[in-house]
Amino acid sequence: MFEHWQLPLLMTFLAGFATVIGGFITFFVNKNNLKILSLGLGFSAGVMIFVSLTEILTTAENMLKLYYPVKYHWMLFWGFIAGALISKLIDIFIPDHVEEEDFEDGCGPDDTHCKHKHKIKRAGLLTAIAIAIHNFPEGLGTFLVSSQNITLGISVAIAIALHNIPEGIAVALPIYHATGKKRLAIWYSFWTGITEPIGAIIGLGLINWFFPEAFVGFMLIAVVGIMIYISFDTLLPLSHEYGDWHYAITGIMSGIIIIWASLLLINGY
């Protein structure tokens, strides 16, 4: 079904491995002084919200119209809910934060330094697992959008890559502080991002061998639900954490304006 899948797959790889960039930033920049990431996260949210509710929604609608000319409106509605529910279920069973009381320290009763380092390292490991699972549907979404419209795919891949940078920081920072090993911190940030291309590969296999072509439209509208959920549940709170709401709003509006203008220029308007 997908005759030109190589470029969408490559874009998903590049977006996923932006976590490694975050890993490298950990060694040079203080996590509490990353105002530019606040703007970047807001920018990512603006791009994903605008692209999802305009271009991707329209693409999914046009595809579903071909197979469900009467009921496609309801297909869009339930597909969006399905995407949002997928994201919600992941959040319920794999929360994207770790509480210190959720794990044991494994050190002696008086060795407070050991306990502190062990807790930091364990938090980094559990955070890596949580983020890796959260990244899986993002990889699927990036691949599906890119396979249908390469211009939109580039926009989505850039937005995903931008918000993967602080995810890499969230994983690498505790690992590096606990162990002092740069390679180990980078390695964990790498494995966190690899689940995105894995999601893309699985999506390619499912569409090619198991699901009918009409299902692509339903999956695209589910991607809209996933991206809207990610924007409000992850990107905007993180943007506030790294800066404040002024940075977040500035990033959101910049993302919407720039992606809107770029789409107009690319389409020759």
Image: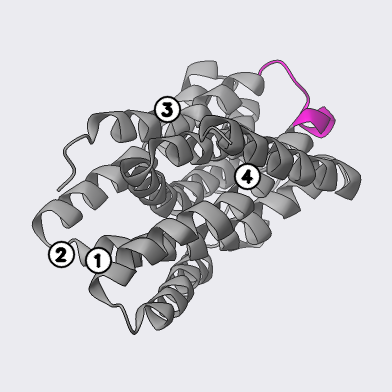
- Where is the C terminus found, in terms of image quarters? top right
Give the x, y percent position of residue 94: 48, 63
Going from N to C along the chain, the mark reached first, 3 or 2, is: 3
Give the x, y percent position of residue 9: 30, 34
Any part of residue 180 in sight: yes
Give the Cα distance between marks 1 and 2: 6 Å
Contact (Cβ within 8 Å) of mark 1 with mark 2: yes
Give the residue at mark 2. 212
Give the Cα distance between marks 4 and 2: 30 Å
Give the Cα distance between marks 1 and 3: 26 Å
Going from N to C along the chain, the mark reached first, 1 or 3, is: 3
Give the Cα distance between marks 3 and 4: 18 Å
Indicate whether 133 appears above or below 254: below
Local packing at callout 4 (Cα closer than 10 Å; few below 14, some 14-19, many 20+) is: many
Going from N to C along the chain, the mark reached first, 3 or 4, is: 3
Which residue is at the front of the view, 59 or 170?
A: 59
Give the x, y percent position of residue 150: 39, 36
Report the residue at 59% width, 31% height from top.
265
**Region in magenta:** 27-36
Indicate whether 217 appears above or below 135: below
Give the residue at mark 1. 215
Circle 1: element type: helix
Give the residue at mark 4. 47
Give the residue at mark 3. 14
Report the residue at 87% width, 49% height from top.
245
